[in-house]
Image (cartoon, rainbow, N blue to C red):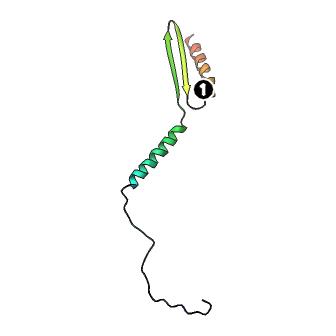
């Protein structure tokens, strides 16, 4: 370098590749897969609807974990369509 002589005195054969076996890796991958599955399932919307007939009346209730406002608007329309079909 800039006129200075460079002399190689020894060559060390080595690589950056390291091969190992870790018995905990499948457990970590399984935990990661479960976490991904749980995150994906939390995005899905679920709606539950109950109907009970008592004393000649139909009592209807429902619950939703997503889009509660949309479910609140859709439930009366569903009940209206059921009463139209009954007549």
Q: Where is residue 39 in the image (x, y as percent from the top left)?
A: 51, 42
In the depicted view, which residue is nearer to us: 76 or 62?
62
On-image quarter of the C terminus? top right
Name the residue: 55% across, 93% down.
Answer: 5
Q: Position of residue 71 (x, y in %)?
A: 60, 26
Q: On screen, 32 above or below 71?
A: below
Q: On screen, 1 above or below 16?
A: below
Report the residue marked by disc 1.
71
The count of marks equals: 1
Name the residue: 45% across, 44% down.
Answer: 34
Q: Position of residue 6 (x, y in %)?
A: 53, 90
In the depicted view, which residue is nearer to us: 15 or 49?
15
Look at the numbered disc 1 and give the secondary structure of its residue. Answer: helix
Q: On screen, 38 above or below 57?
A: below
On-image quarter of the N terminus? bottom right
Q: Where is residue 9 in the image (x, y as percent from the top left)?
A: 46, 89
Name the residue: 61% across, 19% down.
Answer: 76
Name the residue: 54% across, 14% down.
Answer: 59
Where residue 11 sits, quadrant-wise, is bottom left
Q: On screen, 53 above or below 34?
A: above
Q: Which residue lies furthest to the top in this view?
A: 55
């Amino acid at each position: 370098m800039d006129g200075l002589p460079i002399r190689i005195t020894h060559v060390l054969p080595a690589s950056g590749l390291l091969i190992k076996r870790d018995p905990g890796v499948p457990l970590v991958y399984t935990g990661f897969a479960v976490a991904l599955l749980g995150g994906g399932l939390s995005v899905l919307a679920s709606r539950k609807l109950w109907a009970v007939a008592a004393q000649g009346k139909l009592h209807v209730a429902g619950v939703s974990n997503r889009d509660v406002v949309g479910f609140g608007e859709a439930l009366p329309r569903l009940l209206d369509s059921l009463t139209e079909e009954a007549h």
